[in-house]
Amino acid sequence: MSIQESGEMYLETIYRLLQKNPSVRAIDVSGEMGYSKPSVSRAMGILRQTGMITIDGDGSIHLTEAGRTRAEHIYERHTVFTGIFKALGVDEQTAEDDACRIEHYISDTTFEAIKKFLNERCAGDQD
């Protein structure tokens, strides 16, 4: 199921928070993203309807298999682009901000080509 850029940003945030904490709730997402509680609540409802998350009785958010796959996909793009920009000498905040913009719009074909190029380039540098 297709979700918009904002949904991808929420999924990525939930994924990153779950890497640091055993449990994530909407208030954690709100604090991390700087969005109001009602905005986060609405987004969580949409993500639940699209099958990306579940929310248990105590309010803990869990990524479904589809949600985790999508979040990992977006997070990989984010980390690859951030790394490229920092290697080019871009300051960390700008690298993060620009990676966040690009990760949602670049095609899978182009992203895979970039990864392949970087892997071949890095392998060539070790020779």
Image: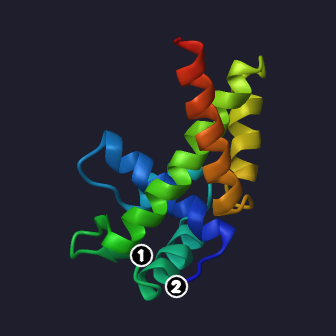
The reply to whether the C-beta atoms of the residues labelled 1 and 2 are less than 8 Å apart is yes
From this viewpoint, which residue is outermost toward the front?
127
Q: Amino acid at mark 2?
A: Met
- Residue 83 vs residue 8, the one in the foreground: 83
From this viewpoint, which residue is outermost toward the top?
127
Residue 28's x, y, as percent? 43, 52
SS for dot 1:
loop
Q: Amino acid at mark 1?
A: Met
Quarter of image, res 85: top right
- Per the model, the C-alpha gap separating discs 1 and 2 is 9 Å
The residue under the point 55% across, 55% down is 74
- Residue 73 vs residue 52, the one in the foreground: 73
The residue under the point 58% across, 70% down is 7
Other-residue count near label 1 (Cα within 10 Å), few / some / many at <14 / 14–19 / ≥20:
many
Identify the residue position indicated by label 2 in the image.
1
Q: Is residue 36 above or below residue 28?
A: below
The residue under the point 24% across, 74% down is 56
Identify the residue position indicated by label 1 in the image.
52
**Colour scheme of the picture:** rainbow
Residue 16's x, y, as percent? 43, 46
Q: Is residue 30 above or below residue 54?
A: above
- Residue 90 vs residue 53, the one in the foreground: 90
Other-residue count near label 2 (Cα within 10 Å), few / some / many at <14 / 14–19 / ≥20:
few
From this viewpoint, which residue is outermost toward the bottom?
49
Labelled disc at residue 21: none
SS for dot 2:
loop
Q: Is residue 4 left or right of residue 72?
A: right
The residue under the point 41% across, 69% down is 67
Which of the two labelled residues, at mark 1 and mark 2, occupies the earlier sequence position? 2
Residue 18's x, y, as percent? 33, 50
